[in-house]
Every structure is written in structure tokens, then in C-alpha cells.
Image (spheres, rainbow, N blue to C red):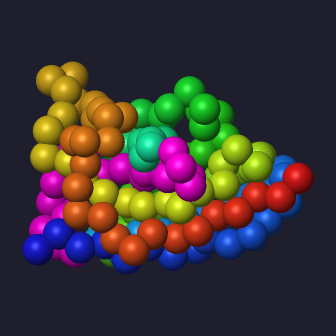
Amino acid sequence: QVQFVESGGGSVQAGGSLRLSCAASRDAYARPCMGWIRQAPGKERDVVASIFTRTGVTTYADSVKGRFTISQDNAKNTLYLQMISLTPEDTAKYYCAAASSYFSGGTCSLWSPDFGGWGQGTQVTVSS
């Protein structure tokens, strides 16, 4: 069964940092790709970062490149998202999810329909 429990969200001022964690079930962590997805009120879900769990190769949306880092701890079946230089535009609920498909070069997509098994999410609020 694919299950996730996200944590680590909170309220910070612009320029601040947060580290999100996602505890994944064994079935979830066995998927080749995992990702962090965010959704702001009234907006679509966006995949901000994904990781090919077999090799650790990462992919980032342009909006977060250089500021967010996705990582994994295979011993703990846990996914992380380190976020720095946060802006009000990063305000959203953040979810982790898994995908079964991946590109032949060993990278994962940033297309949200590829991902599933949503947890309850963790809210990130950045004030100016």
C-alpha cells in the first residue's frame, strides 16, 4: 500500500528556510520515482522536485532550481525537501508522491499526473 506522511511545514518570513520530511511506506518507496508536489489555493498542483530513487538523480522545476534540494534516506524510507531563500510565491501545501514511470535516461518527470498516493500534506506559508 502506497502511503506518505509529510511533516516539517510552517510559517517563515521571506528569505527563510524549511526542511520538509516525508515518511513513505515500503510499497511507496519501492517506486522508481518520488517527488514533492505543491498546490496553492486556486492553482494547479506543480511538481517542484523529483528523484530517481535507484540512483538519486534529481530534477527540479525552474521556479525552485538553486533553492530547493530533494534528497532521500533509503534506510529510513524517507524523502526530504530542503528549501532556502523562500519567497511568498512558495506558499502552498506540499505533498510527496510516487511515480511508477521514468525516462529511459534514469530521470523522473515533473508532470503531476504521473504521481500518486498523496499524503495529507504539510502547509508552508512565507510572509513578505
Q: Return the x and y of residue 17 as percentages of the image width and height.
A: 74, 58
Residue 53 versus residue 73 in the image, above or below? above
Residue that appears at 30% across and 64% down = 118
Residue 80 versus residue 67 in the image, above or below? below
Front residue (pair 57, 19): 19
In-image side of 27 versus 6 (left or right): left
Q: Return the x and y of residue 36 as percentages of the image width and height.
A: 43, 52
Q: Return the x and y of residue 59 as percentages of the image width and height.
A: 42, 34
Residue 106 versus residue 20 in the image, above or below? above
Residue furthest out toward the top = 105
Front residue (pair 35, 92): 92
Residue that appears at 23% across and 55% down = 116
Residue furthest out toward the front = 42
Quarter containing the N terminus: bottom left
Q: Return the x and y of residue 47 as percentages of the image width and height.
A: 42, 42
Front residue (pair 91, 101): 91
In-image side of 25 versus 124 (left or right): left
Is residue 57 at all visible to an observer of this figure?
Answer: no
Residue furthest out toward the right = 128
Magenta span: 25-43
* Residue 35 on the magenta span: yes
Residue that appears at 56% across and 27% down = 62
Residue that appears at 34% across and 71% down = 119
Total marks placed: 0
Q: Quadrant of residue 16?
A: bottom right
Front residue (pair 57, 120): 120
* Residue 14 on the magenta span: no
